[in-house]
Image (cartoon, rainbow, N blue to C red):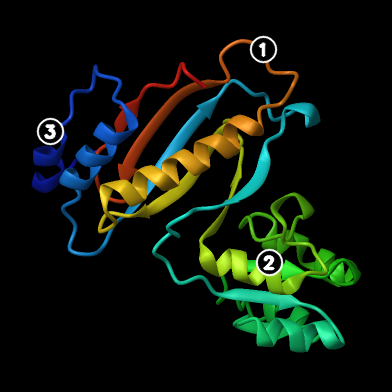
Amino acid sequence: MKHGKKYIEAAKLIDRATLYEPADAIALVKKAASAKFDETVELHIRTSCDGRHADQQIRGAVVLPNGTGKTVRVLVFAKGTKLDEAQAAGADFVGGEELIPKIQNEGWLDFDVVVATPDMMGVVGRLGKVLGPKGLMPNPKAGTVTMDVTKAINDIKAGKIEYRLDKANIIHVPLGKASFGEEQLLENFNALMAAIEKAKPATVKGQYLKSISMATTMGPGVKLIANRY
């Protein structure tokens, strides 16, 4: 893969053989961010889990203290008074069964997170093939299947992110924006790592996290010390 001049210049700032402390890694990725837009700072965590086993799956959510820097559009599936509650709490879209054909047939996906009350999961389940592959399916572990729609919406708008293993047993998550201060990004990093550490499956023995790397959307990766987790 060919890289542009800016990437090559940014890569010179980073020693590929060094495992950095979180604060040093954050300073480097901020310095290496050279795109014309406000890049997202991302974390990629390779685990020693085997996601094919149910008892080694990792899935959860954490509210980042300083948010993600992104405006998140929330769709809520509910009925009755819960529709009004969701609207009052600031949901971008609310509805029920009438939204199914819009998503299924018209390909409408102008939302980032889906919340559903438990009594609507029978309806939302019909969208499994559309929402599932995009990671948008509501899930109780992530707090997106709940009767407390107000709390769910508030948490999401405040910077709640979901983390889960991909097929290669890696967790990919946003930490914030390159324009954030170093302290803000470090607070977000610490909150996220505490949650992932807590989510360690009991059946995983030995070193839980094999490697951690941090990068901006367009920038080179910085490797972090992983053996303390």
Residue 131 position within the rendered picture, expressed as x and y whole percent measured from the top left: 68, 62
Eyeballing the image, is 42 above or below 123?
Answer: above
Q: Residue beneath label 3, please?
A: 13
- SS of the residue at dot 3? loop
- Spatial distance from mark 3 to mark 1, Cα to Cα? 35 Å
Residue 45 position within the rendered picture, expressed as x and y whole percent measured from the top left: 48, 32
Residue depicted at x 81% and y 69% = 124
- SS of the residue at dot 2? helix
Of the numbered discs 3 and 2, the one sitting upstream in the chain is 3
Residue 43 position within the rendered picture, expressed as x and y whole percent measured from the top left: 42, 40
Q: Residue beneath label 1, please?
A: 205
| Quadrant of the drawing holding the N terminus | top left
Of the numbered discs 3 and 1, the one sitting upstream in the chain is 3
Q: Quadrant of residue 177?
A: bottom left
Q: How many marks?
A: 3
Residue 148 position within the rendered picture, expressed as x and y whole percent measured from the top left: 78, 69
Q: Residue beneath label 2, please?
A: 152
In screen coordinates, is 42 left or right of 51?
left
Eyeballing the image, is 30 above or below 138?
Answer: above
Residues at discs 3 and 1 in contact (Cβ within 8 Å): no
